Amino acid sequence: MNDLEKFLKRAEGLVERLEQLLPPAAQVPDWKSATAFRWRKSNGRGFLQPVRNPHRIHLSDLQDIDRQKALVEANTRQFVEGRPANNVLLTGARGTGKSSLVKACFNRFMSKGLRLIEVDKTDLIDLPDITDLLMGRPERFILFCDDLSFESSETSYKALKAALDGSIAAPLDNLLIYATSNRRHLMPENMQENLETKYVGDEIHPGETVEEKISLSERFGLWVSFYPFDQDAYLDIVAHWLAELGCKPSKSARETELMREAALQWALQRGSRSGRVAWQFARDWAGRGTVPAKTKSASRRR
């Protein structure tokens, strides 16, 4: 065996050992096994894990956010029908239905070929691997990032920026990104950054740090804002969920008033009148099975 053959043999052995250290390529999922998936990691390998029992919330369950529902539903319908549509950023008060609206739209259009993929913030670096799996598929995919926000020291947001529209590769026609966040620009805004602002005549020019943060949220074509509910809206939502849980309207004004007072006290203890708090109260009230629990607000807004 000459020196060249010895060298090639050693090189082949080295490559084999290196391949054993590298994580294997992402496996092609069984698309027929589920309609919703989660991106998961195991031993350094990413894969799409089927969600066997996705959350079956309906658009009609989401009360007092009619404008937000109309915007996101219309955008999703455009996407499913193969028409132009935008990536969506849903921001605002906690517990007001941001995540539920994404799930409800998925449930609405699931039968028309829509698929949902949930990706954690820490796994956004794997977006190129995920898009490779979706390329050329006939289904339409929403990549869902829930409760998304980044700290100043994190750099994984750059992968999201590239996936939205900053990469040399064109975005996939069958993929949109829907993200929810309590932060409008997804990143913390510090007072120190305002000192970078420059004034040129009557014009205000934000500093580079602020521009960098804004540039991420601006890549979402559709912004949908959510706001805290007032008392009437909160009680509307309580009434809806009590009805969904089988609580019949009470004929007694006193029982109705007891339920309303308990619902408001529940919200006061949690410091929030939100859809989530209303749902939690309704489950507690209906679950206790008391006579007043078989009630709902008689003054529900139309």
Image (cartoon, helix red, strand yellow):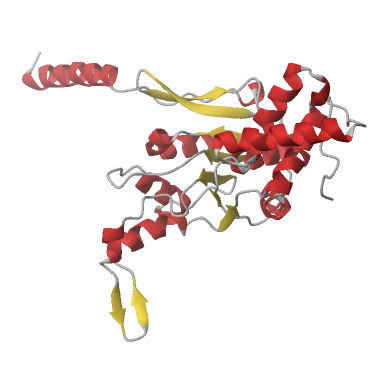
Q: Looking at the image, which is closer to me, 114 or 96?
A: 96
In the rendered image, the residue lying farthest to the left is 3
Quarter of the figure that contains the N terminus: top left
Image spot of residue 298 (x, y percent): 86, 40
Image spot of residue 47 (x, y percent): 47, 25
* Residue 288 sits in quarter: top right
Q: Looking at the image, which is closer to me, 258 or 209?
A: 258
| Residue displayed at 68% across by 55% down | 71
| Residue displayed at 58% across by 41% down | 272
Query: Would you say 208 lies left or right of 249 here?
Result: left
Residue 113 in view here: no
* Residue 255 sits in quarter: top right
Query: Would you say 212 lies left or right of 185 here?
Result: left
Image spot of residue 267 (x, y percent): 62, 37
In the rendered image, the residue lying farthest to the front is 254
Query: Would you say 1 lies left or right of 113 here?
Result: left
Image spot of residue 275 (x, y percent): 66, 39
Does residue 218 lie above or below 204 as drawn? Answer: above
In the rendered image, the residue lying farthest to the right is 251
In the rendered image, the residue lying farthest to the bottom is 201
Residue 288 in view here: yes
| Residue displayed at 64% across by 57% down | 84
User: Tag count in the figure?
Assistant: 0
| Residue displayed at 35% across by 48% down | 158
Query: Would you say 97 lies left or right of 133 here?
Result: right
Does residue 227 lie above or below 136 as drawn? Answer: below
